[in-house]
Amino acid sequence: MSDIKTVCKNDVDRCVFLEENEVGRPICSLGVHDRLMQLGYPNVVLHCNSEVCEIDNHLCTFFRDSGWKFANEPDKDKKVREECVLSCDLLVYINDSNLGSLAKTQANISDMILKPRNIIYINHSNLKPSEIKQLCQNNAPAANWSIETIINQETTKLEAVDCGSLRVKSPYFCVFEAGDLIPKNYLSDIDAAYFDKLEKFLAMIPTGDAISGFFCQTRLYNNLGKNTEKPIVDKLRNVCKSQSCEYMLREYNGK
């Protein structure tokens, strides 16, 4: 039995977004309770009465107690949404010795609605690190970037991604191959899914052998051993199938 829960109200304090309707029933002014019940996730149970209000098997990112600095602000709903933003790093895999492919990717990143927190360029090509560095300095789409150079050309693509993942600092990361399209709404759509729609998923998986569009929780990726022995995609599918939670994986359709 999981002990994960959000205590919206107890005899000590309550979430600043918890209100009472005309009959005294606790309700969430942000609509979190109603949305979770609509989604119908297994084991997510809402217990609310006049004394206590709890959500079993769900950690609410919007919970704020009375000590929150914006607790008494009229626009506190906007303030809490500003605090809840997807923190995701981007791995750019470079296997094309044409700088044009990387320049295309740079332009895509600059157009993204929600930018990655950090960018890690995985150089698995004949490009010199100085060439990549110069391109990044002249047209850097993010403040924080680094280069992971793969010297051994026999290293596989997935092994190279694993090397680049060692530089990830955010709770989530995604992967795109240089030259492949990065939709401008890629991260903003995931952000909206997590914080507006309250959808739950662990990873997003591209079709076939592609790596572009892969998205995953960093801790989960590391705990499953990355791509060691078998691809991380296969590990994710096996874990979710064994726990009957295939809905926790999303397919990336390139949009």
Image (tube, helix red, strand yellow):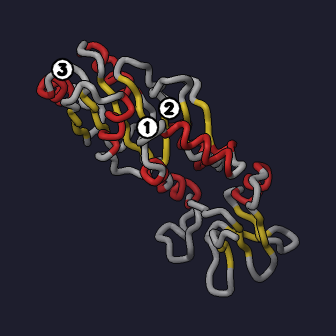
Q: Residue furthest front?
A: 229
Q: Are marks 2 and 1 in contact (CB under 8 Å)?
A: yes
In the rendered structure, the answer to whether residue 162 lies left or right of residue 40 reads left
Tell me the residue at 31%/24% (across/down): 106
User: Type of residue at label 1?
Assistant: Cys
Callout 1 secondary element: strand
Q: Residue furthest bottom?
A: 11
What residue is pinned by disc 1?
174
Q: Residue furthest right?
A: 23
Q: Alpha carbon of mark 2 to alpha carbon of mark 1: how far?
A: 10 Å
The 10 Å Cα crowd at callout 1, few under 14, some 14 to 19, many 20 or more, is many
Residue 220 in percent (x, y) is at: 49, 51
The quarter of the picture where residue 164 lies is top left
- For residue 140, above or below residue 180: below
Q: Is residue 6 visible?
A: no
Which label was assigned to residue 186? 2
Q: Quadrant of the N terminus?
A: bottom right
| Mark 2 or mark 1, earlier in chain | 1
Tell me the residue at 59%/66% (across/down): 63
Callout 3 secondary element: loop
Tell me the residue at 22%/35% (across/down): 147
User: Type of residue at label 3?
Assistant: Leu
Q: Are marks 3 and 1 in contact (CB under 8 Å)?
A: no
Q: Alpha carbon of mark 2 to alpha carbon of mark 3: how far?
A: 27 Å
- In this rendering, which labeled residue sits more in front, label 2 or label 1? 1
Callout 2 secondary element: helix
Tell me the residue at 58%/49% (across/down): 195
User: Type of residue at label 2?
Assistant: Tyr
Residue 26 in percent (x, y) is at: 77, 71
What residue is pinned by disc 3?
127
The quarter of the picture where residue 197 lies is top right
Residue 3 in percent (x, y) is at: 65, 72
